Amino acid sequence: MVTRTKKDLVKEVANRTGLDINTVKDNVHAMFDVMCDGLGRDGNIEIRNFGIFKVKSIPERTARNPKTGETIEVPAKKLIHFKPGQLMKQRINNEPVEPPPSPIITPEPVAKEEPKKEEPKKDQRPKRPKPMGSDKNQPAIILLSRPVND
């Protein structure tokens, strides 16, 4: 089993993309920095088809030194847990990888809209205000201003 370093990953990405090694190196460093900040702040990072990074808190506990039998207080700490995604599991186990179906977008034919005919406007009366009472069975009293003829 060969251990791959960050430098190896940068070279591989640069070869695959055709970008400059320094540009890829800066982007990889920036990505790791953003991931570390996100884990410290939010506690979770989910990358679809890759996996989920979670921060788990381990409470303080009492442990025993097996040689001396002395009890020791182990302080609380946080650990990072990684759960691989489905696509990663398939690649690791050399199973055939079926990429997720990509939505095929077909342009729909555009129907020409006929210009709408304007309907003749009717004499519009002012709308009556709705009753203010909470009981709908009782009619509300609505006062309308009318000119007074003497």
Image (cartoon, helix red, strand yellow):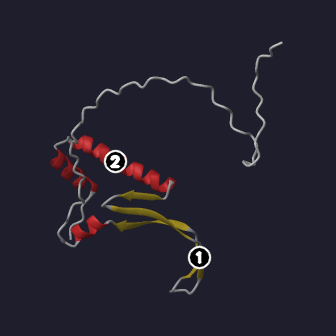
Residue ID at (28%, 31%): 113
State which quadrant residue 89 falls in: bottom left
Q: Position of residue 131 (x, y in %)?
A: 72, 39
* Of pointers 2 and 1, the one earlier in the residue sequence: 2
Q: Quadrant of the C terminus?
A: top right
Q: Is residue 69 left or right of residue 34?
A: right
Q: Residue flagged by tag 1: what amino acid is it?
A: Arg
Q: Position of residue 143 (x, y in %)?
A: 78, 29
Residue ID for mark 2: 29
95 or 148: nearer the viewer: 148
Few, some or many residues within 10 Å of mark 1 (<14, 14–19, 20+)? few
Q: Position of residue 3 (x, y in %)?
A: 24, 65
Residue 91 seen from this side: yes
For this orientation, the residue located farthest to the right is 150
- Distance of mark 2 from mark 1, alpha carbons? 35 Å
**Residue 61: image tag:** 1
**Residue 11: image tag:** none
Q: Are marks 2 and 1 in contact (CB under 8 Å)?
A: no
116 or 139: nearer the viewer: 139
Residue ID at (43%, 53%): 36
Q: Is residue 56 left or right of residue 111?
A: right
Residue 73 seen from this side: no
137 or 76: nearer the viewer: 137
Q: Position of residue 106 (x, y in %)?
A: 20, 45
